[in-house]
Image (cartoon, rainbow, N blue to C red):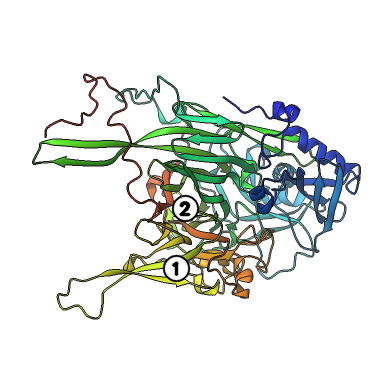
Amino acid sequence: MTIDSETQAVVGVAHPLDPLSRAEISRAVSILKDGPAAAESFRFGSVELREPSKEDLRNGTVPAREADAVLIDRNGGTAYEAIVNLDSGIVTAWTRLATGIQPPFMLDEFDECEVNCKKDPRVIEALAARGLTDLDLVCFEPWSVGWFGEDAEGRRLMRALVFVRQDPDDSPYAHPIENLVVIYDLSSGTVARIEDNESIPVPAASGNYLPKYVGPARTDLKPISITQPEGASFQVTGNHVQWADWSFRVGFTPREGLVLHQLRFRDKDTERPVINRASLAEMVVPYGDPAPVQAKKNAFDSGEYNIGNMANSLTLGCDCLGEIQYFDGITTDSHGNPLTIENAICMHEEDDSILWKHFDFREGTAETRRSRKLVISFIATVANYEYAFYWHLFLDGSIEFLVKATGILSTAAQHPNEKTPYGQALNNDGLYGPIHQHIFNVRMDFEVDGPLNAVYEVDTEIPADNPTYTAFKAVDRLLETEQAAIRKADSSKHRFWKVVNHGSKNLVNEPVAYRLIPTNAITLAADDKAHVSQRAQFARNNLWVTPYDRAERFPAGEYPNQSTGSDGLHKWTQADRNIVDEDLVVWYTFGMHHVVRLEDWPVMPRQNIGFMLEPHGFFNQNPTLNLPASDTASADTGHCSTTAGQ
């Protein structure tokens, strides 16, 4: 079932956190075009819900529906922010951004770059010098230009890497045109310059993965049938979801994609808040190869590309399996027309092995309960890579965020039979995959049993007084200020962090808490002096904690595209604000250190990266004791029995 945004627009939104409908986006754009954005040269980078204040939501106040918009005047390249009151039809704020600030790319700018690069005589000449004259087979892949100490003079730039196909459905990533880069100026709509260095032979070996190239599919795998004869266990009303003891609201933004709001757990008869808002806030993909083309690859896929706009329309049996609930993603094209990404978000249940079990060997009886999880996901294609983002909710109150990375490597070329130490040769024809990282940051506005929380770092230590040499214990350390809470994971100390509410105590008079288990806790491998380190300072540490500020939304700042690194977590936390018993935001950095392997080619098997949040004294005991012993009462179907002997 797909949520009908058009119907919502007719009958009105059900909740202040519901994303803007198509009709609301059209109204916001119309109001702006009738006002300060009347010129034809204006383009719309994004139009999305301006979320109500937390105070209004807590007080039950019904605020005016507002839209946040980011626009660019192509006549001069100036960017603007706007706030539109949809109830009154008034533009309540119109702010010109400083020269040089570049909002994320718009979808049609990618097409524009490729089309116009193929028309430029200098580009055509450079390709011809390499023996490439069929421009229909040449692919220009626009990347962000980053910042490397050079003044862009206010120009909005793209950095196009170049690949070529051998035939129309060939994989271009098998044939990079190394050392040829086109810098495209979106402000003027022309090629700014060409970076043409040493010509390296274009690798010719195929990298195709389509069925017609790899041969017949194997036939020895039998079907797996996933059925829920009585339907799914969740209930969906608009964008509100109730599943088992969990409830939450589904949101969607162009920048973040999937957003979870008001995540709560029903403990007996009490709805207990856990997280007010959670989303992917940023990611950066820096490459470790110092070769001329590769050294400048460091994409901020959220802040530079608006990863939500790149969400796939998901399909049953391929991307999702089971009893599915879909949610559309409503965004806009650059002219302000509403754009629907159908089935952008998928929600379903999955079996999750055992949740708990004990066999009483004295009595010969066993008690086993199976786990299941609710999966809420979206998948985005960013040029060569696919990123699948999953929030998993478990019956015991645990939460997992998981990224599944797949797609195709961003390849490079070297001379045949050479082997660079900065990548993995993928064949003997000169193709290789450079070493790189995928570093993600998730923003979590915690609300553990209420808005006033604190954070502890927990390390396992060996006490000085240890006569048996066997003692070790967990030691809590309160992180009192922002600077104290800039932390790295430490597996040697079995480190984790817990978010507590000092005003809410559990059975043993300890503050209730959730703990963050820092798995996949990598940080930037680049030197601290590197430009990417200055721009992505959030990725130099795993944990950051800040008091809630509505304006502090993204760890690399509001506009990382072509930024110099002057905004973001490292700047905000210089104030060293108090974070004890405050309304807190926890930022966790994690990722994948991608040392490329042969098995990643020609298309990469998915890699899992993520972290867990677990209740830590949040409940007084295991909250799943009331689960039934089996999903079915039929004794002859192979399902477990609570009295089965071993």
Q: Is residue 459 above or below residue 211?
A: below
Count of labels in the image: 2
Q: Residues within 10 Å of mark 2 (few under 14, many from 20)?
A: many
The residue beneath circle 2 is: 433
Left-right relation of 233 to 568: left
> In terms of sequence position, does the residue under pointer 1 or pointer 2 come before the other?
2
Residue type pointed to by label 1 = Lys
What residue is drawn where x is 11% and y is 35%?
646
The residue beneath circle 1 is: 488
Quadrant including the N terminus = top right
Q: Position of residue 625 (x, y in %)?
A: 31, 40
Closer to us: 255 or 214: 255
Q: Residues within 10 Å of mark 1 (few under 14, many from 20)?
A: some
Q: Secondary structure at mark 1?
A: loop
Q: Is residue 423 above or below residue 257?
A: below
Q: Secondary structure at mark 2?
A: strand
Mark-to-mark CA distance, 1 and 2: 29 Å
